[in-house]
Structures are given as structure tokens and as C-alpha cells.
Image: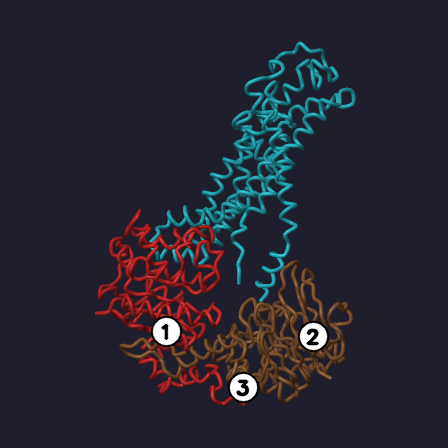
Chain colours: A cyan, B brown, C red
Amino acid sequence: MSAVVEQQIEDAAPRRRGGRRSTLVLGLSLTGLIVLLAIVSLIWLPYPPSDISGGRLEAPSAAHLLGTDKLGRDLFTQLMIGARIALLVGIGSVALAAVLGVLIGLIAAFARPWVDDSLSATLDVVIAFPVLLLAMLVVAVQGASLWSAILAIGLAMSAVVARLTRILARRVLQEQFITAARTSGTRWHGIVLFHVLPNIAPTLGVNLALQFGAAVLAEASLSYLGLGAPPPNASWGRLLQEAQGTVLTAPVGAIAPGVALVTLVLGVNFVADGLRDFIDPTRRRQR
Amino acid sequence: MSLLDVSGLTVSAGRQVLVDDVSFAISAGERVGVIGESGSGKSVTSLAVTGLLADALSASGSVLLHGTQVIGAPDRELRPLRGPVAGILFQEPLTALDPLMRVGRQVAEPMRRHLGLRGTALQDAVRSALVDVSLPDPRFAGAFPHELSGGQRQRVATAVALAARPRLLIADEPTTALDVTVQDEILTLLDRLVSERDMALMFISHDLAVVSRMTDRIVVMRSGRAVEQGTVGQIVGEPHDPYTAALVASARALDSALDAPASGASDGEASR
Amino acid sequence: MSILELQSARFAYGSRTVVDDVSLSVSAGEAVGLVGESGAGKSTILALLLGLAAPSAGSVLFDGAPLDRRDRRIMRRFRADVQTVFQDPYSSLDPRQRIDRIVGEPLRSLGIASGDDARRAVLDAVTSVGLDVDVLGRYPHEFSGGQRQRIAIARAIVSKPRVLLADEPVSALDVTTRIQVIELLQTLRRETGLALIMVSHDLSAVAALCEHTIVLQGGRVVEDGATSDVLHAPQTDYARVLVSAIPRLPPARAAE
């Protein structure tokens, strides 16, 4: 009974969908802006990254759109490089988390109870571990660099992805169409590839999109603490750290990277939110 | 005066109409069945009658329950009706009973609130209510729902629904989730209690045979509308509406298979 | 010789015996109904018959020989010959796959047919269950329960099986659709000689389709005979109670 009523209530809410579409558009625009900056930075920069010809801490001008930092480097150039780095970190750590997380999650979903329990316990420990602490460990071993940041963040996120994958996969495995696939002669690898993954992909996808934003912020925190890559190939987080001391006299140095961070993270979050609506419009039960 | 008077009841969820201009009445002591398949709006109707519709649904028309207008009435006005006037029995005893509360307490609650019973009087009333639903062992009162079988849970749910001595029992697919032998026991129980207490009954189901057994009059619903109303004899013997006729014919075909089952080389085609 | 058979099969979860000493068989063209209430062991027996679980004792025979679940060649033939229709039409079709892929899955996974041959077989199966060609490009959510069950039946017959195992195939359907699906199964049996093992708690559906009925209680067989005998002259108390508990329509002639 309640399923019928629930479904009919859902059917009767068309307004929500319109709202979701504008969220998606806004998200794509904001994200697109940053992506554009990053792409352009690969072929053209206003100034060479290590050029310190500008005066120190100059205010924005025609020559330097956002002014200069305390060593005379053009801020706009650094912002564009930062965009490249932010996207690299986001994509890199999410890719690592996705591959590792889905793999472990699937193993846990199919494993015997005791294997599943031990895996889950391990994942819980990793999740409880603060990302920054994990990052420091990795940096202590690898040295501070962009790649150690991606490694650390990716590893930390993979535990969350693994947990989610495990739950989603287990739920799918309970469905009768999985048993139907078995009686149709489909082997387990076929079941995972053609039945499990396509059914968990939408929810997982939205989750990964949200993780992207979290990864970018995590890297910014790491850089702020000096654990990320040093300038001139510095990330926005590092720029924020450098601008700390002069925030009152040359505010643009802190505002610019801050705004850039917010734009990217908000943009990606809006995309994730807008995507939620396209998750499974096909899955609705009609009783 | 009818105990329940439904007139032009319409329930919608946004643009979708779930119940469309439905009217019927139940007098004191009368037994009426509401039959329909999935999506017919029969369950939504029973919720509308007691003012239990979800907030997202909007209802219009008139529902007079013991003289009180239910449509648009605030919960405060309806609470005194649920229990002493109308008791409700749902399909899923697992979700209708509070899993964290002992069974005895759940039966006691409506008695405490509506009958004002306390202390030993309350305990005795609970014991007596459980005996009435054939759960005589005093240990049942201290049990949790998950410790009981499906049939036992539905008996408890019945005791709770009848605790405040309602004039009308609304039973929404009360036996659909039960095994056939248990269903038989519960239906016998409901039949006896409704007779003994001279109550009116609104029995909702998709099973024509069950509804024929439990009620005297039937309202047939389809896609939110009441397409036909009549006595059990009329509906089952001479349905007028084409949908009703199809429903009865299908039920009849399945029913006759029991008298003339598939046999040997022939495949026993169900006769129409 | 029987196509599919259980011989004194037993299944236990640790100390709990769910199925005890159950024997049954089905030969070409026969239809057997397995009737029981919850806890009777019906689903477990079905899992054993489908080769999804191995019995703790006793054996599962396919064409007279014990079924070796590890022998891939035998299992391929088994899966092609023994197909199933499940209970919940809303859960037995992958919501993210189109109908043509769903119905064609056994052909792909068992290497029975591919390309045009497969497409033809899928088309054949879909039309034999009374559905139109244009369902192939659609998704499950676009169909009603009765239609989905037909799609599930199409998937079950696409490999031209010899035995169809049906698990409560009509219980989740509306009464008017129930009859249509039952008639479809009757037609398929008549036209292809398909054998049927149907598990159900609903005796009227079993009565319409199966000449032979086995009544289960607590994991054991309590009654085993021709359906008409079980219904009209049950030997055991349990079967008697079960049959008399079935809600019946009032006789048509007694209209007041």
C-alpha cells in the first residue's frame, strides 16, 4: 500500500526536477570556468611562472590583473597554475579512490562473512584516521610533492568509496535479477560487469563527484600546512598560506585563491547535486 | 445516521488523482467490503477516512465519521475518533506494531487514553483483550512483537485496534501477508469479534473470495473510482460494470480450478 | 526417465534442518506443484533444483545422473534445459538493461546463439508470450507487473528449456492478470511439451496448471499425489486443513 502512495507522491512533484536542472547548469558553469583557466594555462600564461619582474605586493593593474605576491610574481599566473593543480589533484585522487575503493568494496561484498568483517573493520580504522595525519605519514615517507598529496588523499577517500561500494553491491546482490543471471548461466565476472556495476554506478558517481570537491579542499589544507608542492607551481592552498602575513595590506593575494577554491568546490557540488536527479529516473517502481 | 458517510471523496498527490469522487456509507453494525487491485485507491480511501493521509496528499469532499467532518479537520479533533470510534487493522503486523514495546503495553495504551483505565483494572482489561483474540497465555503480554509469529502479531494488532471499543473496524488487507491456514484463523477471529461487539466493518482487500466471506455489501474500486456497489450476491452473481464483470470472471476461473484441477494428459484449461 | 529429480534430499543450516528427506521428480511434459506455507522449505528445494545450492544429503539428478555443479559442460546444458521464472516481477529484471538484452542473456552466457540467430530467438520468445516487438528497445520500468512477468517468461523459454521452474509466478500479480499468465503457461506447455515444477502457496494456481501436487510441511513431504486427489480426498490432516482454509467464492447461482 505505502509503496503505491509513495510512488504517486513522487510522481506528483515535477517542480523539483526543474530546480535540479538549473543547479546542474550553474554547477557546470562554475566548474567550466575553472577548467577553462586550467586548459588555457597549458598553452599560455600572462607571465612565465618564475618571473619576479613585477614589484612586490603590487595592487591589481593593467599589467598584473590581480597584482603581485611578496616576491614579485604575477598572481593571475599563479592562480591559473593553481587551477591546473586543483583539477589534477581532484581527478587524480578521485580516480585512485575509485579504482581502489570499488575493487576492495566488491571483494568485501562477495567475500565470506569473516573476510568481509575484517575488511570492514580495516576500512573503519582508515576512515577514522584524519586525512591530514595520513597525509603527513605519506609525506614523511615520500617527501612533500603533488603526488604524495594525491596519494594520501586518494588512499583516505578509497576507504569511504569501498564502504559505499560494499553496501550498494550487497543490496544489488540480493535482487532476484542476480539469481536470474546465475540461472541464465552468467558467470560471476559477467554478473559484476553487466549487473552489479551498472546498478551501483549512478549512486557511486554522485558520491565521487562530491569527493572531488573534498579532495580539492583537502589538498588546499595540506598546502596551507606546507605539505604540498612549493611555488612557483603552487596550489591555491599554498597561495593562501603565503598571503597570510600580508592579508591586510594586500588582500587580493588571499581573496583571489579563496574565491577560486570556493568557485570550483561549489561548482562541483552543484553538478553532483544536479546529477542526483538523473541518477535513476528509470528505477521507479510502478505498482 | 450512518456511522461513516463518504461523499465525493477526492484525494490527489499534486496533479495525480488517487481517489476520484468516491461515495459510500456504512451504517452501525453493517459490513462493507472495498475491493480493488493495485492502484485502485482502496488503501488511500481507508487512510482518508481516518484522517491519516500523508501531508503531501490533499483531500476534498466530505467524510463524516460519527458525525464529525474528517476532511480538513485538525489532528486534535480527529484523535478522539481514532480508537473509540474507528479502529484500524493494517496489512503488515511487523510495521504496525512498535517493535520496541512489549505487546501488553501496546494494547494498554489506547485503553489508558480512551477508557481511562489504570492499575489493576488496566492489567485485567489487557489480559481479557488478549484472551479475546485467542492469546490466553499470560506470557504473551510481556512479549515483544518479533518474538511472535505473523498470525500472533496480527491477533495482537487486532486487540490494539479493538482496545478502545470502537464502533467501526477498518481492516486494510489484514490477512494478505499471512499463510492460508493462518488467514483462515484470523478471518474467523475477526468475524466472531465483529459479531460479538456488534461493530461495523470496512474490509479492504483484493481477494474477492475473502471479501465475500467477511462482508454483506461490496464497493468495487478501479483507478480511484467506485465503479460499482451492491450486495455480495449482486456483485458476484450479476455484475453490471464491465470491470467488475472481468474481476469476477477471473476470480471465478481461478476458483473453479479447485473443483476441476488439471489432470493427466489434458492441461485442465481454466473454464471461463 | 525423469529430467530433473530430487532423491531423499536434505538441507541443513548448521543445526537447523530446513529440508528433510524430500524426493520428487518431473519427466517430459509433466507438471508438478509444490505447495506449502512459509517455513515449509519451498525456496530451499527450489534452490536445490536449480543447482544454486548443494544438498547436505541425498542428491539432485539431471537426466538420471547426479548433478556435478563443478562440471562446466554439464552445467551449461543444465542451465539451458532448466530455466526459471521468479516471484517478484519488480525485482527479477535488471532495471538498467533493455528488454532485448534481458531476454537474450541466457543465449549469450551459455553460448547458445549470437548475432542474428540470437536476435531471432529473442524475437520468437517475446512474441510467444504475447508481447509486441517494440518492447525490445524499452526498459523494465515502463511495464506493468503482468507484462514484466511475461518478459521473465520470455527469458526463461528463449533457450528452449525442457523444464520450467516457476517460483510463485503469479502471487505478486493482480487477479485479472493472474489468469492471463496462467493461461500463457498452459499454452506454452501444450505447444512445446515443456515440463513444469511450480512452487506456490496458492492452491488454485497449482490446481489450474499441475496434474500432480506435493504438499510440504516443515521441510518434509506430507502428501504426494494427483492434484484432484489432494484437493478432494486428502490423506493427511495438514492437507485437509490446508485445503479447507482456501477462501472460496460463493456459488454463482445463490445470488440473493
Q: Tags 1 and 2 in contact by the CB under 8 Å rule?
A: no
- Residue A144 shown left or right of residue C19 in the figure: right
Residue ID for mark 3: B233
The residue that appears at 67% across and 68% down in the rendered structure is: B10
Name the foreground residue: C95 vs A244. C95
Q: Residues within 10 Å of mark 2 (few under 14, many from 20)?
A: some
Residue ID for mark 2: B7
Disc 1 to disc 3, C-alpha distance: 34 Å
Whole-percent x, y for residue A97 in the image: 51, 38
* Helix, strand or loop status at disc 1: strand
- Residue A152 shown left or right of residue B53 in the figure: left
Q: Chain of mark 2?
A: B
Q: What's the amino acid at mark 2?
A: Ser
Whole-percent x, y for residue C61 in the image: 26, 65
Residue B1, picture quadrant: bottom right
- Residue A202 appears anywhere in the view: yes
Q: Residues within 10 Å of mark 3 (few under 14, many from 20)?
A: many
Name the foreground residue: A275 vs C147. C147
Q: Residues within 10 Å of mark 1 (few under 14, many from 20)?
A: many
Q: What's the amino acid at mark 1?
A: Leu
Residue ID for mark 1: C34
